[in-house]
Image (cartoon, rainbow, N blue to C red):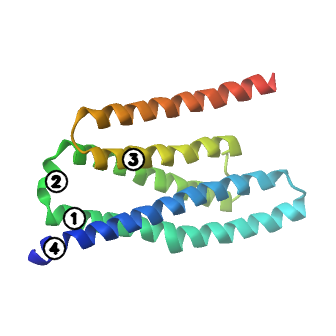
Amino acid sequence: MDFLIENYAVWKALHVIFVVSWFAGLFYMVRLFIYHTEVNLRPDEEKRILQEQFDVMQNRLWYIITTPAMILTVIFGTVMLISNPTLLKMPWMQIKLIFVTILLGYHFICQGIMNRLKLRSSKWQSGHLRIWNEVATLLLVSIVFLVIMKSGLSWVGGVLGFFGIGIALMLGVKLYKKLRKS
């Protein structure tokens, strides 16, 4: 146990490094989903070639970078909590863990999207995927503000305000699309 406590800063640094890698993978993965979906508008031969290439790119990104980074993020975060269990009693950490749980759900939904794209059975449209990509941004900003601000009402207002802005943007995009179609 002393080894864990003595190396807390190392675990924290590794945790942050793999969080950055995980988010980089998630952001790029959903961008690839958008491109993969948009090739459906191309001629059949070009569509087939591009779909196969996107399958390879997504598979490599997911299994070589994104999922290992997620696993290592969780491992080093858990090691930090084991080496400093008083963190679990802090409200900001409890809320952070809720956001991390939502982020894990986001991760596995992305894996499902990737698998459906491989099977050519995805119902997602590029516009929906663009909005979906913003969910990860909202989670990232919320988690970072939460961790940096820790306690104090300001982070609560910041997180709620950011989600409010995100929801307003999504509704604005939907309204714009409706107006453009009519």
Question: Any mark on residue 99, and which?
Answer: none
Residue at horizontal 87%, vertical 63%? 46
Q: Choose mark 4 or mark 3, whichever is in front.
A: 4
Q: How far is the residue under mark 2 from the one under mark 1?
A: 9 Å
Query: Is residue 125 in view from this perspective?
Result: no
Looking at the rendering, in which quadrant would you find the N terminus? Answer: bottom left
Label 4: which secondary element: helix
As rendered, which of 139 and 61 lies closer to the eye?
Answer: 139
The reply, left or right, for residue 44 in relation to residue 169 is: right
- Which residue is denoted by mark 1 in the rendering? 80
Q: Amino acid at mark 1?
A: Met
Q: How far is the residue under mark 4 from the one under mark 1?
A: 8 Å
The reply, left or right, for residue 131 in relation to residue 73 is: right
The reply, left or right, for residue 63 in relation to residue 37 is: left
Q: Position of residue 17 (x, y in %)?
A: 39, 68
Query: Which comes sooner in the sequence, label 2 or label 3?
Result: 2
Is there a contact, CB below 8 Å, between mark 4 and mark 1? no
- Which residue is denoted by mark 2 in the rendering? 87
Is there a contact, CB below 8 Å, between mark 2 and mark 4? no
- Which residue is denoted by mark 3 in the rendering? 102
Count neighbours of disc 1 (C-alpha within 10 A) and say few if under 14, some if 14 to 19, many if 20 or more: many
Count neighbours of disc 2 (C-alpha within 10 A) and say few if under 14, some if 14 to 19, many if 20 or more: some
Label 2: which secondary element: helix
Q: How far is the residue under mark 2 from the one under mark 3?
A: 19 Å
- Which residue is denoted by mark 4 in the rendering? 4
